[in-house]
Amino acid sequence: MKNKKFITILFLIPLLFSIISCSEDNATDPPTASITPLAKFSDIKAKVFVNCTGAQCHSSAGNQANLILESNVAFNNLVNVQSTLFPQFKRVEPGNSANSLIIKILKGEVIPQMPFNGTPLPAATIDSIAKWIDLGALNN
């Protein structure tokens, strides 16, 4: 009887160590579910700017702050363009989201925060726009 228990324990110990070591290996892998996909300008236009133009604020009809974000002109009105409201900043400075006015306005670092009189964008959306800027603000 003692021999059976001893053999069973000898069998279970290596099995237990292999289970523990496998779970530790997986713990060092980066969690893929928390990685935010990188923004592309086409995504930003479709998911963010559509609200800015739909509210008639940054459309050719509204033209607030001399900024039109309609699909065919948004890129040229943002990237490497000095702000008319805050001339010390470019609206989007490629490679430098921290100094880009769009990020400052979306985060509420300058007033008025956008969307004007609306719910601020989720941090993940702002981070995604910042990532697009930091990667060169490509027209993709």
Image (cartoon, rainbow, N blue to C red):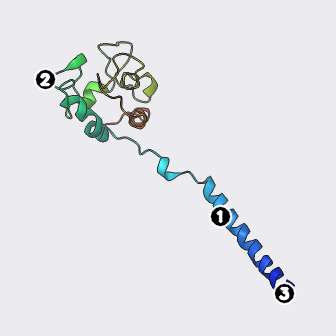
Q: Position of residue 64 (x, y in %)?
A: 22, 19
Of the image marks 1 and 3, the number of the one nearer the N terminus: 3
In whole angstroms, how far apart are the C-alphas of marks 1 and 3? Answer: 32 Å
Q: Position of residue 117 (x, y in %)?
A: 29, 22
Which disc number belongs to residue 1?
3
Which disc number belongs to residue 61?
2
Which disc number belongs to residue 22?
1
> Looking at the image, which residue sits at the far front?
1
Residue pictured at 27% horizontal, 36% vertical? 45
In whole angstroms, how far apart are the C-alphas of marks 1 and 2? Answer: 60 Å
Q: Nearer the viewer, mark 1 or mark 2?
A: 1
Residue 91 vertical position relative to residue 86 in the rendered view, above or below? below
Q: Amino acid at mark 3?
A: Met
Of 3 and 126, the residue lying toward us: 3
SS for dot 2: loop
> Is disc 3 surrounded by few (<14), some (14 to 19) or many (20+) residues within 10 Å?
few
**Left or right of 78 in this view: 7:** right
Indicate the quadrant where residue 86 lies. top left
